[in-house]
Image: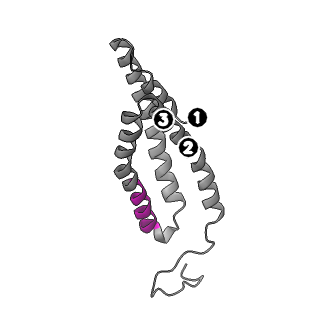
Amino acid sequence: MNPPTPACVLISLTPDIPGWAAATLLLAGVAVHTIGELWHAAAGFEVSFALAPERATGQYLGVFGLGAGLAEAAGPALIIFLCITWGCPGWYVMGVLFALTGLAAPLAVRWAGRHRPTEQPRFEGEQARSPATA
């Protein structure tokens, strides 16, 4: 199970308990979630560089950054809708979403690794490289 899922469970347990216990659970949830964020950042950098063809790294990183930007744009609205509006059940739904994406990511990376093009892409107007100049 990826760390953000248990973090959501810990945070969801904080209503209607004494303040010291809620603070302890929140701190534990933040610590567990931070571990998940660090794993995600390291894996994201590795995947974004490893899957990009050598000559198209910039384009691949641009698309990768676009996905991160979309997540940053949609994330607050999703959290408000699920966690603020729904309360405890919303935190559980958020945890399930984290778990599902955490399970799908390795499958997507394996698929992308198997379906990589065998030759480097050429840019418009670029001449094919001969083995002598490669």
Amino acid type assigned to the residue bearing label 2 in the image: Gly
Q: Which residue is mark 3?
A: 4
Look at the image and give the residue range highlighted in magenta.
57-68
**Which residue is drawn at the image coordinates 39% and 20% (left, top)?**
15
- Residue indicated by mark 2: 102
Q: Are marks 2 and 3 in contact (CB under 8 Å)?
A: yes
- Residue 105, percent from left and from top: 57, 49
Q: Provide the secondary structure element on which disc 3 rests.
A: helix
Q: CA distance from mark 3 to mark 1?
A: 9 Å
At numbered mark 2, what does the secondary structure look like: helix, strand or loop? helix
Which numbered tag is attached to residue 69? none
Q: Residue at x 50, y 87 (%)?
A: 127
Is 129 situated above or below 99? below
Q: Residue at x 50, y 47 (%)?
A: 43
Expressed as whole percent of the image width and height from the top left, the position of residue 82 reads 42, 38
Mark 3 surroundings within 10 Å by alpha-carbon count, few (fewer than 14), some (14 through 19), many (20 or more): many
- Residue type highlighted by circle 1: Met
Disc 1, SS: loop
